[in-house]
Structures are given as C-alpha cells and as structure tokens.
Amino acid sequence: MIKAVILIGGPMKGTRFRPLSLELPKPLFPIGGFPVVYHHIEACKKIPDLKEIILIGFYQSSEHLSKFIMSAQQEFNIPIRYLQEFQPLGTAGGLYHFRDQISMGNPEAFVVLNADIMGDYPLREFVEFHKQHIGEHSILATEANRRQAHNFGCLVEDSDTHKVLHYVEKPETFVSEVINCGIYIFSPAALFKLMGEVLQKNYQKMSTEPFAANVESIRMGEDVLANLASSGTLNAFKTRAFWTSIKSAGSAIYANRNVLSLYHKTHPDLLAQNGKDQPHIIGDVYIHPSAVVHPTAVLGPNVSVGSNVVIGAGARVRETILLDGAELKDHCCILYSIIGWNCSIGVWSRVEGSRCDPNPNEEFAKPDGESLFGNNGKLTPSITILGRNVTIPGEVIVLNSIVLPHKDLSQSYKNEIIL
C-alpha cells in the first residue's frame, strides 16, 4: 500500500504570482484548462495500490478548495483530504505534524509532490525504482544547465548505485547539474525518526537563542534531504521528461504550452480542432465547452480558454491563458499574456507580453525571468498580466505590464505595474 501527499504551501508564498494569487490559491490556478494540483492528482492516480491522496498546506479552507476536492474525489474515485497547518511549518514540517495521518494504515511508502511544479510525471516508473530500495528514500532528479543549476536543490550521485552522495539547497557555488524535481518517495518510519531529531535540535537551539525562528519548522532541502544524503539512504531516479517549476506567472505560460503538448498523448479529446463554423486553430489550443468563440477568431498556438469566455470577431490570441468570464471584443490581439477573470478587452486593442522561454541554444535550460525586477531596478520584460475585472478600452496598447484587479485603463501603458 502507498499514499500520496501533495504540499500546496500557503498564502505567504507565491508572491511572485501576484496579482493572480490574490484571487485564488496558486495550486488551483488553471494550466491547460485545469488547476495545477488537478494534474498532480491525475498523475498520482496512475500509481498502483494507491490508498489515498492528502493535501497539506497553510491555506484557509475555502469554497474554492472544498469544491475542487469534492469534484476531484468523484472524478478520480479516490479519497482526497486537506490537512491545514496551524501555522507555516516550513517546506517539510507539515509532513511531521501530520505523521499520524500519513502513517495510518501502515503504508510501506508515501510519495510527496510539491504543488509548484509541472511535468510529465513518471510516477509509475519512479515507484518501481523505489521498490529496489525498500526502507530507504528516493528523489526524482533531472538536469539543468550549469548557469541555472544554483537556482535549485543540487545533488551529486554515484552513477553506478544511484546513491545521493551530497545534497545542497540552492548552492552559492557550482555543485552539480543534477537538480531536485520536488518529488520524493519516503519510508515513513525512517523519515519521521529523522524529522523528530531535527525538531529536537531546534528546541535545543531555542534554549540558547530565544529569538530563533519557528522551532516547529522543518525545511525539506537543508534539514531532510541533506541529512538523508549524508546517511547514505537517499537514491536518485533521473528523468528526461518535461519538468518545470512554477514560481512566476511567466513560467505558467511555459508550463501551459508543455501541458497542452502532453494532451496529444493523454487527452487528445481536449484539444480544439478546426471545422466548419469553428474558429481557426493553430497548434495546441484548449477551449472550455462553455466558451463562445467567433468563427473568424484565430487562436493558437498554446492557448487555454476558460469557462464563459467570449471572443469576438477577428480576435487574435497566441501563447495566452484566458481565465473564466473574460471578454475579448472584435479584432483585439492578445500575445504572451494572462487575462484575468471577467476582464474586458476593447475593440482593436492589443495586450502583449515578452516571451519567457528557456534559451533554445542551451541544453537543459529552464525559463529565466523569475525575478520581477532586474539589477537596474527596472521591471523585467515578461508576460503581461491582468488581474480580475480589468477593463481596457478600444484601441489601447498594454505592453509588458502588470495590472492589479478592478482597474479601468484609459490610456496605453508599457513596462509598468499599474496599482
């Protein structure tokens, strides 16, 4: 028997995802037409002998979250529970806090996924790999390039035995091009014993440092993985499948493109097709059944259209996520953008962002542009984001800007955050 745990974080994180995360927990943000955590649950469902899925985080239980869990339980026919931390407990503290719930039923192992990653999760193969290392722990790894590796957890492995010899979280100097994917398989008893020792050290530190940080907090990289690597009980399973982290809204557009591409293999029925009295589709496009799209509109490549969206005649949309209830009036042009809930884009208006793709000339490159501002203090060129209920009048241009919710723009903007 095996369980799955998805760590969904909390509202104090995801600040680079604002203003979108002001409206909705980041794990519920739709990519490829479905919430991020929906893709995690769908991947977990393919694990043999999976008993249940547990979500752990610091988000207040909300209508959005409850409704999502209920519908996911019905669709995937598996128990799904949300366990809310009483305070932020670090990237791994929630696992220890809810150790009794995770250990209930005595699972031989449990899979842990971070909610801010997207990929073609090879979980079935990963579980098979872990079965060769019962009683130990496994980490899913991939390769980054030398320039970007320090942005992730880096590990050094023995290529013959797959043992992780050394692990460093976001090192200041180069350690390895092999990076942590944020997916693990742990053996419960051994992991919780180690975490108990980490907490004990935190309490001892508190007696000498009365203003020490939250003693209940446990960090996945520094406290757990580094210790498992030094004890020789961590094994690496390397994958070359698509993987990306979702820290900023720019990386959401990149993830959206790759998720739509995966639909060719997993859900070809979700991809829009060209046909009589249908809009012109280029490449991979997802359109919610309730959306109304004019036959003269041109969509794609890599567009996701949410529920109750209205797209007018002659509109052009490319590399964009349109959230529920957005209205695009005739002949507007939307490129490299996220258009928020219930936004209205006027006739002949143009909303455009900058491409945030990995460098195609660098092998294993990941998306750059995770920082909102460059070293010169200026806004980094990135995708354009409109928060909820933004109204753009006709014949206006908005370039490389972030617009907070409930704004009525009266002029064109370029490279600005509109508060």
Image: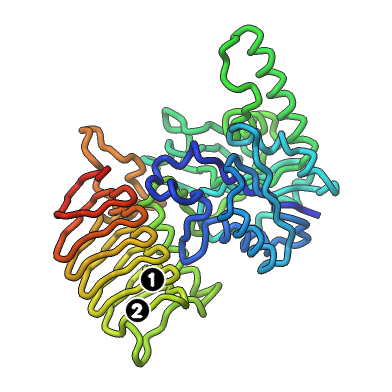
Residue 275, horizontal then vertical, whole percent: 37, 90
On the picture, is 106 further left or further right than 319? right
Which residue is identified by label 2?
293
Quadrant holding the N terminus: bottom right
Q: Is residue 361 visible?
A: no
On the picture, is 353 further left or further right than 412? right
Q: Residues within 10 Å of mark 1 (few under 14, many from 20)?
A: many
Residue 364, horizontal then vertical, whole percent: 41, 51
Q: Is residue 173 above or below residue 263?
A: above
Q: Is residue 392 visible?
A: yes
Q: Name the residue furthest bottom.
A: 276
Q: Which amino acid type corresponds to the residue marked 2 in the rendered image?
A: Val
Q: Which mark is residue 390?
A: none
Q: Is residue 241 above or below residue 286?
A: above
The residue under the point 25% across, 80% down is 313
On the picture, is 98 further left or further right than 177? right
Q: Which amino acid type corresponds to the residue marked 1 in the rendered image?
A: Val
Which residue is identified by label 1?
309
Secondary structure under the numbered disc 2 in the rendered image: strand
